[in-house]
Image (tube, rainbow, N blue to C red):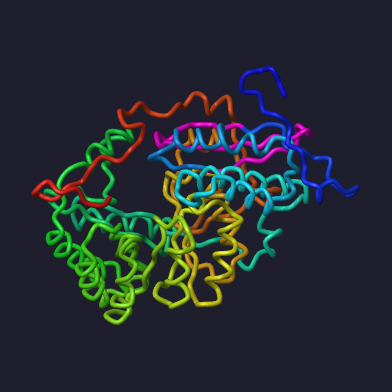
Amino acid sequence: MSDRPGAIEPFVPPAWESSGSRSALRITNVKTILTAPDGIRLVVVKVETNEPEIYGVGCASFTQRPLGVAAAIEQYLKPNLIGRDPNNIEDIFQVNNLSGYWRSGPVLNNALSGIDMALWDIKGKLAGMPVYQLLGGKVRKAAPVYSHASGRNFQAVEEEVLRLKEQGFRFVRCQVEVPGNATYGVDDKSTDDYPTYLRARQGIWNFSSYCRVVPRLFDYLRSRVGEELELLHDIHERLPPILAIGLARELEPFHLFFLEDPFAPEDNGYFPMLRQQTATPIAMGELFVNQAEYVPLIHNRLIDFIRCHISAIGGITPARKLASYCEFFGVRTAWHGPGDVSPIGHAVNLQLDLSSPNFGIQECFHFGDAAKAVFPGTPEIRDGYLWSNEQPGLGIDIDETLAEKFPLPEHPLNGAFPEVRQTDGTVIRW
């Protein structure tokens, strides 16, 4: 045993890994990097090996609980990784997933994801090819993406939709402010400061007002932008289930590409009722963290798009299995891709998008210059598509020195979202 406090002892490989064919490559260090170049809290993992030029990066971004994820990596996963062969991705995932006995949850899964993505990055670099090649190769040239249009009124949303259309986007998510309410998905253009933006979203939410406004928004948009542009909308689990079902029915004449997160995960039992009431395509999964939540919905064909935040389900290893499972039931992928998925996470989304025959659409985020500098190799958005740079591994890196110049923003709750309440003071879901 080492006499240095906190020292990490080298991993002793199991007997099956001790054969003559065992790789000489070993994990020597795991770094957790907290950075916020766009003002959004990101957690990045870097796995280093005994060959200094061979390392991998991964996304572990849980922007509301970044310090919890960092602690899980540094205090629990890292000691179980030093000395292991990074080639054994599946074994490492299983070992670390089971080592805590209680499994799943966004903190543990994001910690696992940072490691898992970094190991796939290493695997691709060792093979000299992009990760999508390890997943079976390309089935499309690039990934079609959707961007976000929002505004204080219908006219402002229309202007954003037309602006994005001119840039080549054929898919646009549309959200509009509900007067007097803390509306989800409506950007505050008056500030670039993310904590200020979140504080502006804190307040009162009225279910009925929202349900009245949204159908009128899409009626307005269809009359002005036509039928060819694909429009999407996100309820973001903010409605009682029966009101979400009613809204989905009202939106059916406007032919949405999909309606996102009509229910919270704990309300999955309402999906059969929703399916009976409307043919509006449904996207679900942003808040899912384990297979018990999504397998029944897929198997029973109750959703049309799976929307998981890949780091919240544990990384590439579980996500590639999920994508393949969805293919058998006609469910398409639409991985979560906002600004609180790091550029590394977006690179991972793209590797799966390019290799999945049942790909549907990819959410995109327009990263600023600072983020692109911190993360060289950030996937490029061009003409409404996300393009691979064709570099080995995930095709992206992190400039650690530059990342240090963008510490996590100060916040009294370390990134937790503010509460949203009904007029009587009852807290509701975000």
Instruction: Please check the rendered image and state whether residue 35 is part of the magenta-colored stretch, yes or no.
Output: yes
Residue 275 coordinates in the image, percent (x, y): 32, 78
Q: Left or right: 340 with respect to 79?
A: left
Residue 183 coordinates in the image, percent (x, y): 22, 50
Question: Which residue occupies the foreground of this view, 294 or 393?
Answer: 294
Stretch of the chain drawn in magenta: 31-59
Q: Residue at x 28, y 77 (%)?
A: 273
Residue 233 appears in view: no
160 versus 294 height, above or below? above
Residue 229 coordinates in the image, percent (x, y): 37, 68
Q: Left or right: 85 with respect to 313?
A: right
Which of the image's four quarters has the N terminus? top right
Q: Left or right: 222 with respect to 400?
A: left
**Res. 135 image quadrant:** bottom right
Q: Residue at x 43, y 77 (%)?
A: 301
As drawn, the residue found furthest toward the right would be 20
Instruction: Please check the rendered image and state whether residue 180 is part of the magenta-colored stretch, yes or no.
Output: no
Q: Residue at x 77, y 49 (%)?
A: 128
396 versus 305 height, above or below? above
**Res. 267 image quadrant:** bottom left
